[in-house]
Image: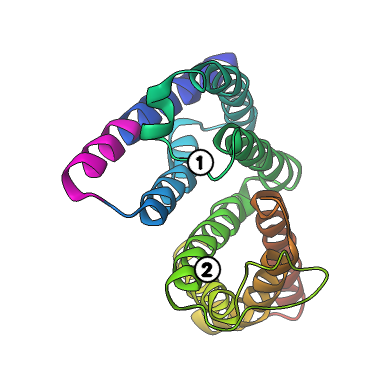
Amino acid sequence: MFYEGLKGLGALAGYFIGVILVMFVLKKLCKLPREVFRKTLHIFAVMSILVVLAACAQWQGALLAVLAFAAIVYPALAWLERLPVYGRILPERKPGEIKKSLLLYFLMMGLLIAVFWGWLGAQWKYIILVAMMAWGFGDASAALIGKAFGRHPIRHRWVDGKKTAEGTASMWAVSGVVIFVATVLRSGAPWYVCLLIAALVAPICALVELISKGGTDTVTVPVTAGFLLFIAFRAFALVGA
């Protein structure tokens, strides 16, 4: 387990060093708009789950890797925030946003690994990937579409006031497509079962993202998606679908 954890930790460190270098080059060469840059970085972070799953053959090693990475990165980012270059490389909406988001992200990843790989068994490991990608790609599309085309803000005491019908619709559509494609490729279930499950789970993910405030969707959406996917696939298995 310890060796697996070290291997996973090294893989994550190498991956994120590469991501930072790529994002720095993109920012210099392409002059990406601030929000596009942020969400591109967001997608790269989400895809780190592939690195963990590829590097670790046992759930204990994967869990150790993500928790150790979070424990190292959080104080490192807290120290780097004091440097002027930090804000130019990693733009934030408010101070401390990136280190908080990464901490929540890796704690959420650790929870999914512990539940859907450690507790329930390796046959459910694909749910970790599907849940995280449904949230990651859906959330990115909601932010980009909402900012670019959002004309109908959603007014409700449970919503923070910045979200729009267009962004939520984009979250619904993109997370649905991601859930369908990822489950077809990873679950082994028939495509029509995957399609129905995507149709059931995606709107709930969009609703949870809509009412999650202060960046808590990093945890609420993937965890909700994971448990709904597990319940749905178990239900279909029981009826022989």
The residue where tag 2 is placed is 142
Say what amino acid the circle numbered 2 marks: Ala
Quarter in which the N terminus is drawn = top right
Q: Is 17 colored magenta in this rendering?
A: no
The type of residue carrying mark 1 is Glu
State the mark number for residue 175. none
Provide residue 181's location: percent of width, then percent of height.
45, 70
Q: Position of residue 3 (x, y in %)?
A: 52, 15
Instruction: Pick whichever, 184 or 76, lies toward us.
Output: 76
Tell me if mark 2 has few (under 14), some (14-19) or many (20+) residues whose alpha carbon lies within 10 angstroms of its own.
Answer: many
Q: Main secondary structure of the magenta part?
A: helix
Residue 188 in view: no
N-term-proximal mark, 1 vs 2: 1
**What residue sits 44% from the left and 31% below the top?**
55
Residue 140 position within the rendered picture, expressed as x and y whole percent measured from the top left: 48, 60
Q: Is residue 114 left or right of residue 99?
A: right
Q: Which residue is mark 1?
A: 92
Determine the secondary structure under disc 2.
Answer: helix
State the separation of the CA atoms marked 1 and 2: 18 Å
Foreground residue, 113 or 122?
Answer: 113
Toward the right, the furthest residue is 157
Magenta range is: 20-31
Looking at the rendering, in which quadrant would you find the C terminus?
bottom right
Q: Nearer the viewer, mark 1 or mark 2?
A: 1
Q: Is residue 23 magenta?
A: yes
